[in-house]
Image (cartoon, rainbow, N blue to C red):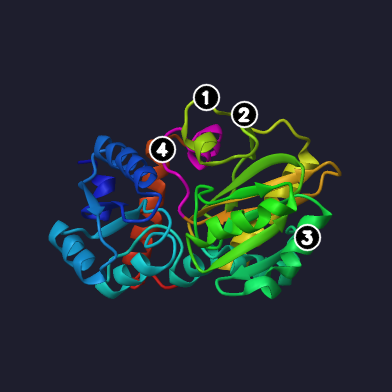
Amino acid sequence: MDLDHGQFGRIGVLMGGCSSEREVSLKSGKAVFHALEEAGCDVVPVDLTSFDPGLNKRVIKDAGIELAFITLHGVYGEDGQIQSLLEEMGIPYIGSGVEANRIAIDKIQTQFLLKKEGVPVSEFCVVQQGDGPCGMAKACAMAEQGTVVVKPACEGSSIGVEIVHEIEKLAPAVEQALGYGSRVLIERYITGREFTAGILGGEALPIVEIRPKAVFFDFQAKYQKGMTEYIVPAQIDQELSRKIQGIALKVFHAIGCRDLARIDFIVDEERRPFVLEVNTIPGFTATSLLPMAAQVTGCDFQNLCLRLARFAAARKSSGVSCNRE
């Protein structure tokens, strides 16, 4: 083992989980595991298959890990629950703490926070389970004025997302989204170009432009090879690039993120960037967006994984074993 990697102790790559993004998480986890193994680290894969914190605690304890590299996506990965468990166990982990994850996974809470902070977001409203016709009134009014996007509050990978062009299709789309949780976000649809800005160690990475062949960057476009073209660095002028990066950093700090994040944008025809989503544990394969942007700066996938592990190890060595910011 490389002597420099001895600082980590045994790294557990937490992957899988029980959310709708389990298969995506397994791909991320396996990629990170192989990268760290090839780097000479003492690393083990830890596949979590339950939402039961007691069971997960035993699985993690049995793995004998001293540092957690979280590649769990969605519920029990990006909602603060696994972070809370690791803090209880005194195991340092990569990424944002409990509160930042709890906020960022909730699209509705994130929208309200960003709006309060003056971050540009699309016009939106909220529908909750059991609201009935009165609760749908504002959503219907928005849909009468133009296209809207219907999103489950706490799902990732565009799962359950529907673009609604005709008002008669709004109720079925909301009903479908409510199948993923009790609250739904309705946003005004913005026509434009899609970009993403990765943040690593508090610094903005080069912007990536996303050009899906589908109507929008949906689950298939994200994970089926050949369905999306990625341009990195994005072919935009420095003024727009810096503007997107500046907003991304503002979002990162407003939510209280740490180590890494990926903020997705739509830029309208008037060159105005709007924040679409915040990802605290973005996809983590060699072809995922944040690693793709890091590669442009000279930080390949293996070194990216090692750098993130060092962030967590530094908190451990400084005595911040509970991981709190």
Q: Which numbered disc, 1 or 3, marks the residue closer to the eye?
A: 3
- As drawn, is 113 to the left or to the right of 167? left
Q: Which residues are magenta?
A: 281-298
Q: Position of residue 301 (x, y in %)?
A: 41, 36
**Marks 4 and 3, how far apart at CA:** 38 Å
Q: Position of residue 269 (x, y in %)?
A: 84, 41
- Circle 4 or circle 3, nearest the eye: 3
Along the polypeptide, which appears first: circle 4 or circle 1?
Answer: 1
Tell me which numbered mark, 1 or 3, is placed earlier along the sequence: 3
Percent coordinates x, y for residue 8 in the rendering: 27, 54
Q: CA distance from mark 2 to mark 3?
A: 27 Å
* Earlier-in-chain disc, 4 versus 2: 2
Q: Which residue was labeled with disc 1?
A: 226
Q: Which residue is mark 3?
A: 142
Tell me where residue 27 sits by quadrant. top left
| Disc 1 packing (10 Å; few <14; some 14–19; many ≥20) | few
CB of mark 4 within 8 Å of CB of mark 3? Answer: no
Q: State the CA–CA distance, disc 1 to disc 3.
A: 34 Å
Q: Amino acid at mark 4?
A: Thr
Residue at mark 4 = 285
